[in-house]
Image (tube, rainbow, N blue to C red):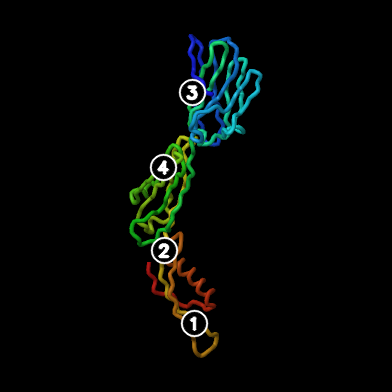
Amino acid sequence: MFFEPMFSQGIRVIGGSRTVVQGEDVDLSCRLLETDEELEQITWQKRTLEEPENHNFLLIYPSGVTAFISPNGLENRVQFFGNQSEKIGSIRITAARLLDEGTFTCVFSVFPSGVYSIEIPLTVLVPPVMSVTVDVPPVIGENEVVLASCLAAGAKPQAEVRWNTDAFGSLVRTVTNSTQHANGTTTVVSHLLGVPTRAANQQQVQCVVNQSALATERTLAYTININCKYELSAFTGCGPSSTSNVWVWVVGLYSTHGACSVASALTTFGRRLGSATQFLPLFVGSVFS
């Protein structure tokens, strides 16, 4: 059963639209003014993303008894905190979900004049899930590649993403893409592109995300790591006192994070070679960067 609102001189219901961040509680307030008529019932209706057809979901009687009409998706998350004697029909929704977004209607039934109501739009904001990563580690000597990617996923409304790169900014550029999902949320990915060089290694950058569900804008710090490639050729010898030595030719590819120094690459490579072959590396040559 649904109600058509009636309008008498002076009698009216007051209330207003509400906005809530997903997971937080929200109060939907309504009050009937300018009448001393007998209150018969307060009815709450809704049409939401979860249930698009308008329907009753909560009945509140003058005695204080409340009755939920199932299924409604709210039975365990709605509290009546109004006052029947003062004709206040306010409710609280706990742990709001995106699916709760829609229009709620507060309906007062009074005798003898009839029914009065007000629609209360509810908007649910969803904060983004944020991270800074790189899918493929950049390697020195390559052409322009993605140095870092900033992700602001599943937000409603869409998040704004920008980079702080300071003096490094003249050497990079950004490309930003967005994808809208069926549930109304949006994912934004901003790529920081540049040529991987020694100068770019260990540069500090920041991804800054701004969105209305966030109390303040969020800053995610990131250190750019450029990999170094070295092709190493090693000769090793064995035999503590034998008259003949055995020489082994080893060719490998080594990649190191952090400071792109040939010395650190040789040291680490030498240790690994010695451990793996149980030979002492005597000479390392043919180094290419």
Residue beneath label 3, please?
119
From the viewer's side, name the closer residue of 44 and 277.
Answer: 44
Q: From mark 3 to mark 2, how far is it between C-alphas? A: 63 Å
Q: Residue at x 60, y 24 (%)?
A: 59
User: Quick one: label 4, few (<14), some, or many (20+) residues within 10 Å?
Assistant: some
Q: Residue at x 40, y 47 (%)?
A: 190
Q: Secondary structure at mark 2?
A: strand
Point out residue 69 in the picture as x, y percentages from the top left corner: 59, 29
- Circles 3, 2 touching at the beta carbon (< 8 Å): no
Q: From mark 3 to mark 1, how far is it between C-alphas? A: 87 Å
Query: Is label 2 or label 4 in front?
Result: 4
Q: Secondary structure at mark 3?
A: strand
Residue beneath label 4, please?
180
Label of residue 228 in the image? 2
- Which amino acid type is shown beneath numbered disc 3? Glu
Query: Is label 4 or label 3 in front?
Result: 3
Q: From mark 4 to mark 3, how far is it between C-alphas? A: 28 Å
Residue beneath label 1, please?
237
- Which amino acid type is shown beneath numbered disc 1? Gly
Across the whole image, how many numbered discs are drawn on residues? 4
Q: From mark 2 to mark 4, how far is it between C-alphas? A: 38 Å
Query: Is label 2 or label 1 in front?
Result: 2
Point out residue 137 in the picture as x, y percentages from the top left corner: 43, 58
In the displayed orientation, state which residue is furthest to the front: 1
